[in-house]
Image (cartoon, grey):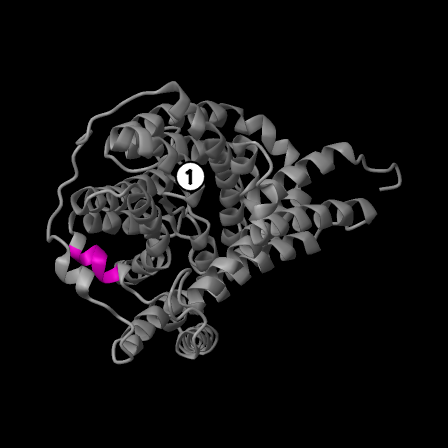
Amino acid sequence: MENTKEQLVKYKIEDVPPTSVAVVLAWQHILAAFAGIIAVPLVVSAALGFSVEETSFMVSATIFVSGITTILQSKGLGPIGARVSGMMGTDFTFVNPTISVGSQFGIAGIVGATIAGSFVEIILSRFIKPLTRFFPPLITGTVVALIGITLLPVSMDWAAGGVGASDYGSLRNLTVAFAVMVFTLCLNHFGKGIWSTASVFIGMIVGYIICIPLGMVDLTEVYAADWIALPSILRYGVYFDLASILAYVPAYLVSTIGTFGIMIAIGEASGEKISSERLQGGVLCDGVGSMISGLFGAGPNTAFSQNVGLITLTKVASRRVMILAGIFLTILGIFPKLSALIAVMPQPVLGGVGVIMFGLVAAQGIKTLSQVHLGDRELLIISVAFALGIGVTVRPEILSGLPQAAQMILSSGISTGTLAALILNIVLKESKGE
């Protein structure tokens, strides 16, 4: 079975695709993740009423550091990094604590809490190795499936035009998303060579071009963006406050669980089993990356789950491609005008490819579960993990009565479902017959 899985991967983790192919595949990863990378600094800046200068600085810093940490995660440096094809960026898990801290202490407070809080993941990474025994295929399959399933509502929102859009769910948005989805599917399935491998990249470019005559691309932000924005360390200073640091701790716990699951999912998509050392390095990179991120004035960094679907779809798991993507991201962080050109990509274009990518991640998890003996005990674990994970994703308001720390940990469907599966797998003992 392992050999069959490896044969299905065109470029495995250590393979080196031709440079021209790798460049296209790297941009494919950037286009798939870019909206998620810049969303958090934009939401935080808007909520805190930051000036145009402060907002621009935070967005550019986020892009720049995402590139650095992506290189660190994929290439590795000593014990840091999982050395797999892992895209990094700032996650929505950190939005609430960032707004809370920023409203009191500004960017200096955010920087201080980000740097100090990063030690939570750095310390937790030392305990990853003994925890891997609690992740048999039953749990890893459940976690991978949950990653895909909990991302599907995001792709639906993209396809409809984006949350809060005045034309949310309009026929135009849905038509564009459907056209991009069908085009990408056909290209991936019937295309040959680079046409199949880069199907998502080509699909998004074609979708972008189609949206221009339809009046769906607003280039105002591109014209307004600066040409160059050099990154600077501690530009707005740093302020450490114990309460602010503690506010970040639950988010860093969620980040640890999420990154652990994403590294496993990347392994499944790559046709390789990720060792405990690699998992440990992946979580350590989260912590070290967040510290670096804080120094440059951006929010905490963590692994991105969106790109797992891209690996599954294109069958390209080469970490050399992601290293290249990291290099391009650092360049985009220095040239905001280029970043803005990607940032104005219409949401329905992302929705069209997102439906395929996230659905494939879920299918990959189900494929893993299909190789496990599913008795009554196993079905019970899977059903409860799915029910709770999907439940808090589609009905997050159910947690409103819980303490703030519990809300933060359980607000992620991935962390809720993973915790449920882990606890049930320990509590519900296997019968002697099984």
Evaluate whether residue 274 shows in this view.
yes
Depth check: 314 or 247 in front?
247
Identify the residue at image location x=52%, y=59%.
153
Which residue matches tag 1? 96
Identify the residue at image location x=77%, y=51%.
374
Q: Is residue 342 left or right of residue 362?
A: left
Evaluate whether residue 82 shows in this view.
no
x then y, percent, for residue 79: 40, 28
SS state under label 1: helix
Residue 183 to residue 251: above or below: below
The boundaries of the magenta stretch are 337-342
Residue 373 to residue 170: above or below: above
Identify the residue at image location x=28%, y=50%.
324
Amino acid beneath label 1 = Asn
Quadrant (top left, top right, bottom left, bottom right) of the N terminus = bottom right
x then y, percent, for residue 219: 19, 66
